[in-house]
Amino acid sequence: MSRAETADPFQDTIAAIATPPGEGGIGIVRLSGPRALEVACRAFSPSSGADPRGFASHTIHRGHVVDPGTGAVIDEVLLLLMRAPRSYTGEEVVELHGHGGRVSVQSILSTVLRNGARAALPGEFTRRAFLNGRLDLAQAEAVLEVVRAKTEAGLKAAVRQLQGGLSGLVQGLRRELLSLLATLEASVDFPEEGLDFPEVGELEKRIYRVEEGLHALIQKAREGRLLREGAKVVIVGRPNVGKSSLLNALLGRERAIVSVIPGTTRDTVEEEFQVGGIPVRLIDTAGFRQEPGDPLEAEGLRRTRAALEQADLAIVVVDGSDHIAPSDLQAWSEPREPRILVVNKSDLPPAVSPAIYEGRFGVQPLFTSALSGQGVEDLRKALQRLLGGEAEGEAFTMVGPRHREALERAERQLLGARKGLGEGLSFEFVALDVRGALGALGEVLGETVTEEVLDQIFHDFCIGK
C-alpha cells in the first residue's frame, strides 16, 4: 500500500496534550489538521482583539482560553500558529501553551475537543508527518528513540537517525540497486541494440558491494538493541572470590553487601551504569558451587544460570590468592561468548602464575583488585570493547528489529541474484531478485508499507507525539 493510499483516514483535525502529566511550568495542547486554527479560534480570545484567522505563520499570541458556552476563562495562554506545510506534521498546527497543572491542561483539551477536534491516537502527529512526507518511516521511528534515549550516546544516535543518518545509508544502497536493475532490464528489453552491457562478473561484483553494505548495517542491529534496551552483564564465580566487591568497584559506590563470610550473596543484585555510552545492567550473582549445600543455595544457583541465559556478556571471577578450583572451571564453562576472565585480589600474593590461567581457561585474564581499584579501569575498557561501546569519533547507528528483518530479506534476495548470475540464469530472473531487494529496502523508509505495519509502529508512541 502506498503512502498516499494510507493518508485518507487522517484528514480530520486532532488534538492532544503534548506535555507529561502532572504539575509543571507549562502545559501544551497541540492541534493538527485542516481546521486546527478554526477550532482553536472557537476557544481562544486574543488579548490584542485581532482576528486569529489573520495571524501570520510561526507567530505567538497572548490571550485566554474561554468556555464558549459560559464565557468563563479557563486559563491564560500563548497561541502558536504554524501554517501548512511548515509544521511538524506538514498540516496546519496550533499549540496552546497554558499553565502546567493537570486540571487546567485537561480543561483546555476538553474545550477544543468539544469545538470540533478529535482526540489524537498514539503517535498520530508523527504518523501524519510521515504520511505528509515530512519524515520517512525510519526518521519517524527515531522520534520515539529520541524520547526514550537512556544515555547521551543513545540520544545522539537517535537524533542522527531523525536527521536521516540511517535513511541516507539505505538510500545509497537503493540507488546502486536501481542502477543495476536498469542495466539488467535494458539487456532484456534491448538485446540487439548494440549497447555495451557489463560482463556477468562485473554484475556479480556490483551486487556483492551492495551485500557488503547491507551486512554492515545488519551488524549495527546489536548496537541499536543495546542502546535501546541496555546490555545485561552478569558477574559469576564461586563464593568469596570478590564478585560483590568488583560490582561495587565498577559502580564506584557501595551497592552490594561485602563480607569475608562465603556465600553472602544468595540472590541476584542488579544495578545500572554506563559503559561507552551503552546503558548496562550489572548483575551480581550467588556464588557458583558444583554441588549446592542446601535448597537456598540451589535456588541461588538456578537464578545465576537463568541470568546467564539472558546475558549479553559474562564476567567470570576467580580468586588470584587461591588455587584454581573445579568450580572455577565450571563457572567458566557456563556462560556463552562473549565472556571475560577476571583474576581478582591481585593485591594479595598470587597462588598461580599468569601462564597457568591461560593454559587452563584458554584466554588471557584481566587482573584486578576490587580493594585497591587496580585493573578496574581496564575491565571497563574490555566491557566497552566487547559490547561495541562508542569509540572516540565513532558513531552508533540505530538499526531496529524491523529494519534488520527488511535488510536481511534484501540480503537474501541479492544472494539469490548473484547465485543466479553464476548459474547462467536469464537476466530477467535475476532482475526479479533485485526488485525484491529494492522492495525490502523501501520498507525501511516506508516507501511500501501496510496500514497494519504503521499501526504497530506508532502504537508505542505517546498520545501527544
Image (cartoon, rainbow, N blue to C red):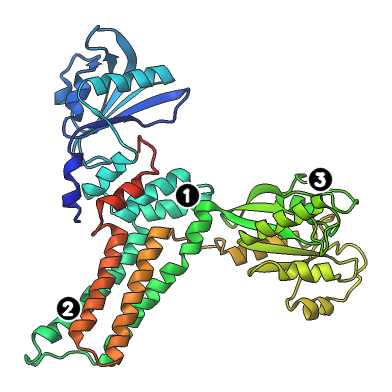
Task: List the single residue furthest toward the front.
Answer: 295
Q: Is residue 428 left or right of residue 124?
A: left
Residue beneath label 3, please?
257
Q: Is residue 289 above or below residue 91?
A: below
Q: Let me know if residue 366 appears in the view.
A: no
Label drawn at residue 375: none
Q: CA distance from mark 3 to mark 2?
A: 67 Å
Question: Tag 1 or tag 2, which sits nearer the N-term?
Answer: 1
Q: Identify the amino acid type marked 3.
A: Ile
Q: Nearer the viewer, residue 118 or 49?
A: 118
Residue at screen point 69% across, 59% down: 305
Q: Residues within 10 Å of mark 1 (few under 14, many from 20)?
A: many
Q: Residues within 10 Å of mark 2 (few under 14, many from 20)?
A: few
* Callout 1 amino acid: Leu
- The numbered mark at residue 155 is 1
Asked if one can make out residue 416 in the rendered structure from this viewpoint, the answer is yes
Please tell me whether mark 1 sits on a helix, a strand or a loop.
Answer: helix
Q: Residue at x 34, y 53 (%)?
A: 139
For residue 182, the mark is 2
Q: Vertically, is 236 above or below 37?
A: below
Image coords of residue 257 (percent x, y):
81, 45
Q: Residue at x 86, y 56 (%)?
A: 293
Where does the image place residue 68, in percent across and percent down from the top left? 22, 12
**Marks 1,3: beta carbons within 8 A:** no
Q: Nearer the viewer, residue 461 or 267?
A: 267
